[in-house]
Amino acid sequence: MVAVPVPGRLVAADALLGLLMPLWQLTIGACVLAAVVVAGWRLGRRGPSRMSRALVVVGTAIIALAVVGILLEG
């Protein structure tokens, strides 16, 4: 939220956007959650071999992101 100086008081310039920001974050989060649930359900229906391969890929991606984050931090 940006405050604009006015003689004698401060006026919020982006008050409406500041109120709507959490709503947009919740909407995006709900869409991502729905996509993950649908993808997980479809993957689970394909059987254990695909599920274990997907877990290995996701686990590898998580470890790779953690390593990249640690390397970029230092």
Image: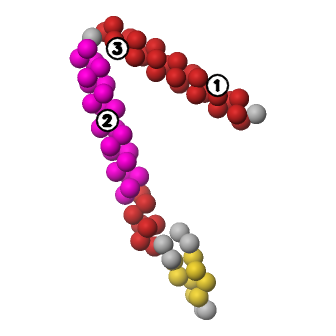
> From what the image shows, is residue 42 above or below residue 56?
below
Left or right, 66 with respect to 47, comes to right
SS at circle 1? helix
Q: Are marks 3 and 1 in contact (CB under 8 Å)?
A: no
Q: Which residues are magenta?
A: 23-46
> Mark 2 highlights which residue?
35
Give the residue type that dot 1 points to.
Answer: Val
Q: Is residue 45 magenta?
A: yes
> Mark 3 highlights which residue?
51
Tell me if mark 1 has few (under 14), some (14-19) or many (20+) residues whose alpha carbon lies within 10 angstroms of its own: few
> Mark 1 highlights which residue?
67
Viewer-closest of 9 and 37: 37
* Image x and y of residue 57, in percent: 46, 17
Residue 4 placement: quadrant: bottom right
* Image x and y of residue 50, in percent: 34, 12
Q: Identify which residue is drawn at 58% across, 28% down.
A: 65
The type of colouring in the image is secondary structure
Q: Identify which residue is drawn at 52% across, 23% down.
A: 61
> From what the image shows, is residue 69 above or below residue 29?
above
* Image x and y of residue 13, in percent: 51, 77
The CA distance from mark 3 to mark 2 is 17 Å
Secondary structure mostly seen in magenta is: helix
Give the residue type that dot 3 points to.
Answer: Met
